[in-house]
Image: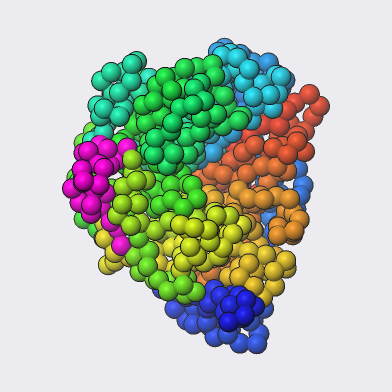
Amino acid sequence: MHDNESTDLQRLAISRRRFIGTGALAGAALFLAGSPLGRSALAASIAEANSAFGFANLAATRADTITLPAGYRFDPLISWGQPLHDDSAAYRGDGSHSAAEQLGQFGENNDGMSFFPWPGDSDRALMAINNEYCNYQYLLQHGKPPQSLADVRKAQAAVGVTIIEVRRDAAGAWQFVQGSPYNRRIHANLPMEFAGPARGHDLLKTAADPAGIAPHGTFQNCSSGMTPWGTYLTCEENFTDCFGSSDATLALTPAQKRYSVKLEGASDNRWHLYDERFDISRHPNEVNRHGWVTEIDPFDPQSRPIKRTALGRFKHENAAITTSRDGHVVVYMGDDERGEFIYKFVSRDRFKAEDPAANRHLLDHGDLYVARLGGQEGEQRGSGQWLKLAFGHNGLTRENGFSDHGDVLIRARAAGSQVGATRMDRPEWIAVSPKDGQVYCTLTNNVQRGTEGQPVDAANPRANNVYGQILRWREAGGDAAAERFEWDLFVVAGNPQAHPGSANAGSANVNADNMFNSPDGLAFDKDGRLWIQTDGNYSDAGDFAGMGNNQMLCADPLSGEIRRFLVGPRGCEITGVAFAPDQRALFVGVQHPGEDGQSSFPDHRDGMRPRSTVVVIRREDGGVIGA
């Protein structure tokens, strides 16, 4: 078969993929995608369907601001460096703040977030907001990677999580409450606890904590989750970037290599050069104490965060929480690195709405699973199963190198490989539909797809995948605790202008007006609209011509229609999403504006460095967002 014929058949297969449970419109899509009308007729049929959206598709742009559809407005809620307390230092805009001052200010590079309504007061709430990592050209006055322990301490003070109070004013606008006793920073040196099966494990013991029960800090916090009992789950992602070795001859262990530990560390962190805790040649187990889901009680400022080891150790993106048919808590998680896995945890005990105290230990007991996806290459749909990761099961034995269940959880990646899980195109956020329980996962991109060990397959259908796709599945019987599921690809991102007629044009619900790359953030609103955020190439050239800055789109899971809702400022990632309960306010994160040096967002004035910011979006008529 000629290469062009292979590409055309692959493109046709993508166009013909079915939506699970979409009924007549899916049948129309199948017919039209195979007809001479192709993409344009399918787009027209979608447009003529009853739309779930009350806004027009937004054009791509490279403007250095938040761009929204007509009838919408945005206001900054809080930005990096904003003082949290009445005695906190005001942001100066020149990188001169000390570590102590940074501890009293909003952290840098906000990412995932959750909105916690105040009991009995609809105009008051708390928000938990991740602060993922540092842009040293803006954080530090000299604009270079850390050059001293003082620089490292400031970086450690800027990452982790920030808890803030917000209130709604008489005009309907949500405002940050400076000086609230609930405002606090949860940072890289804060004392914490381990809980669950790996607590006290030998691989978690260090000279500073010989019992292996009291880690310090959380950092590289990507996205998050909100439990039904009112706590926040923050997810530690690229934690190994903060580690390195003072011994250039050190031989990395297979476990360290599997988690991408490097002797020199990440070039822009250098923590290990000035803080020996992050030197793996001196404290090799310290790296094992990170890469967990950490639970925080935002309503108790004195509480100590808890790392929940039953959920496994890997580069967590977010934690999407639902309940099974009989009340067990289910947590879906992606491991965001090329060729890594999708996981879920099913609690041993049932959620009890009337007993919040009992729920506080639900995440310490249960079963961790990893996904294996089957399907015919070119079909972009198939069936799958969840494989239990438990010592003594599925080859997770001493004979295969696992000493006990704590070891399985600490080396979850190796356990996933042992049981034969499917290597995915960087699993990022996962979201569960409130309407039908289907689960969606962004697979953001993977330029290593098609290389040895990562062959093209049904769920990861393109080599050198620069655009990404969104996977979805329905658990058997509609039960989140099931061990089997059916899956398809909801959308395959691409550029139909740059690659007409090829697999890189994307699926049939991608067109010149809504195209995007690298889907990342993902969330449902109460009405079942799916919100998609991107963290991709914003060059607006070559493979990405016509896509503009990173953006936020809205999708109708039933029709497959996708419309662009928001475009961010230059050089940013759009990440982090939360709705007020009445859906009349949407909180969205703008991370690292000016990463390319070409933004002044949000201050837009001389002498102020660009700042990551959480914005609040409202309709000018006070209506429901997106409706």
Quarter of the image with the N terminus is bottom right
Quarter of the image with the C terminus is bottom right
Q: How is the image coloured?
A: rainbow
Q: Where is residue 7 shown, x and y percent of the image?
A: 61, 75
Q: Where is residue 454 shown, x and y percent of the image?
A: 47, 58
- Height in image: 462 above or below 603? below
Q: Is residue 515 rendered to the left or right of residue 207? A: right
Residue sitting at 45 percent across and 27 percent down? 250
- Height in image: 507 above or below 434? below
Question: Residue 383 lies in magenta, yes or no?
Answer: no
Q: Where is residue 561 shown, x and y percent of the image?
A: 57, 68
Residue sitting at 54 percent across and 16 percent down? 274
Question: Residue 405 lies in magenta, yes or no?
Answer: yes
Tell me which segment is drawn in magenta.
385-410
- Height in image: 355 above or below 515? above
Rendering quarter of residue 437: bottom left
